[in-house]
Amino acid sequence: MIRKSRICFLSVFFLTAFLSFTLSPQAQTFDATKKQVKIHSLGNGMKFIVLERHDAPVVSFHVYADVGSANESYGITGISHILEHMAFKGTKVVGTKDYAAESKILNELDAAYDQMKKEEAKPNPDRAKVAELKAKFTDLEKKAKEYVVNNEYFDMMMREGDAGVNAYTSNDATQYINYLPSNRLEFWMAVTSDRFLNPVFREFFKERDVIMEERRLGVETQPTGKLMEDFMAVAFKAHPYHHEVVGHMSDLQAITRKDVEDYFKKFYSPSNLTVGIVGDVKADEVFKLAETYFSRVPSGSRPEPVRTKEPEQWGERRVAVSAKSQPFLLIGYHVPDARNKDSRAIEAMANILGQGRSSRLYTTLVKDKKIAVMVQSMSGFPSDKFPNLFAVIVMPAAGKTAAECQAAVEEELEKIKKDAVTEDELTKFKRSSIKSALAQLRSNPSMAALLTYADVVLGDYGKAFDQIDEIKALTAEDIKRVANQYLIKTNRTIGEIVTEK
């Protein structure tokens, strides 16, 4: 499941302060909307952010767990994604026919797996004993399956009107999404609090195999997947952005259900969870029900922040993947995180350089020189809670090379560093942001996502609204300055797919 871009989240409010006259009569002005947001924190540290909207009898729920692949250490990469999958497997009440009996089988299953792995890890494993333990493990899996009620959580939610049950894991976060009729508020409170109070990681080994197959299909059998993994490992030598969200195969093979339980206890304490609720609800009722249901979840200390910072890069880095594939080029320059004052100018630079068919890179490489069939630039890659990359990806045209495309990209970057962008380009960027804002403003799910993102990543939900001033103040000189500061050779990593003959 793929993260939504920061541009999408924050564009919700771009320039709405002075464009509110273009909205529907029911829409709120920028300042009025900000004033209507209400916050309540429980004694255990869990935070609820509520925005009332009574124009339709629906409500969006967004649970933001402040944990992603960047929080993982060696040996357990991919565990955040595994835990996301496990969240849909039910609780002591949901997804089981008899939890008391099932729990005994699950414990036996874990013990059999541990014994099997310990025997396999010996210098001279007893093959007969390994085979015996495998047979026991398989038999216990079948017994555990007898107690499972398949997809009960999904079925419950859909019966109550939620056709959009979803979740996704990124480098920075794991997020859980529901969209229900407003008269199902207490139902959501009861079911969701149970997920955090009484999780049961049933069918763990089966689901782990599913994720391993995701890795095979998305990384190991895809040339671009291979390049992406190797590229990130080279671009980030220290910070945990260097590994894929799906994790390394050896880690996935070794992670146990106990590992997932421990990880849940550490990163899913209430103090690490933020909930955004937008729609036809009353904030006072939301907070009262939250006290009733979520206060049951035991408090825990907030996890320690990621310690490692990516050090200064001392020179250009390169990585090449050899594959039976057409050439592919990926260039990344280190840039600061979302809270940095330069982040908005970097977003504008990415948009003007390589987002859309009229962007500079597309016009030059695809339309004029015809050396590429696709080119795009982006900021906040692979995520933006921590310092990240400004990236350019290029797919060369038939008979053209990555070197030709790189030269053309560099030429365009030098132009923006020397001459800056035009006022027309800057105006176009702002207008496209406005268009996105008007589209997103009417969406309760996007609002709930924005409020939680701003509160956790930017440090305060109110900072999402404060960024209107950044848009007003953005100039062509700002973009020229960040281009010269960050788009330098010693700050970049270049990756390419080299075609096997």
Image (cartoon, rainbow, N blue to C red):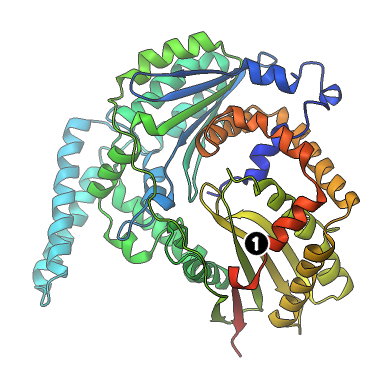
- Between 199 and 159, the residue placed more toward the observer is 199
- Percent across and percent down for residue 314 are 52, 72
- Between 462 and 217, the residue placed more toward the observer is 462
The answer to whether 208 appears left or right of 445 in the picture is left
Q: Quadrant of residue 239?
A: bottom left
Name the residue: 51% across, 50% down: 386
Above or below, 235 against 382 in this view is: below
Residue 26 seen in the figure: yes
- Percent across and percent down for residue 249 are 37, 65
The answer to whether 238 appears left or right of 200 in the picture is right
Disc 1 element: helix
The answer to whether 78 appears left or right of 52 in the picture is left
The answer to whether 75 appears left or right of 163 in the picture is left
Name the residue: 65% across, 62% down: 486
Q: Quadrant of the C terminus?
A: bottom right
Above or below, 110 against 96 in this view is: below
Name the residue: 81% across, 38% down: 435
The residue that mark 1 highlights is 486
Counting labels gives 1
- Between 44 and 245, the residue placed more toward the observer is 44
- Percent across and percent down for residue 493 are 58, 71
Name the residue: 55% across, 75% down: 315
- Percent across and percent down for residue 221 are 50, 71
Q: What amino acid is labelled 1 in the image?
A: Tyr
**In the image, farthest residue toward the bottom:** 501
- The crowding category of the residue bearing disc 1, from other C-alpha atoms within 10 Å (few below 14, some 14 to 19, many at least 20), is some
Above or below, 383 against 412 in this view is: above
Above or below, 355 against 31 in this view is: below
Residue 492 seen in the figure: no
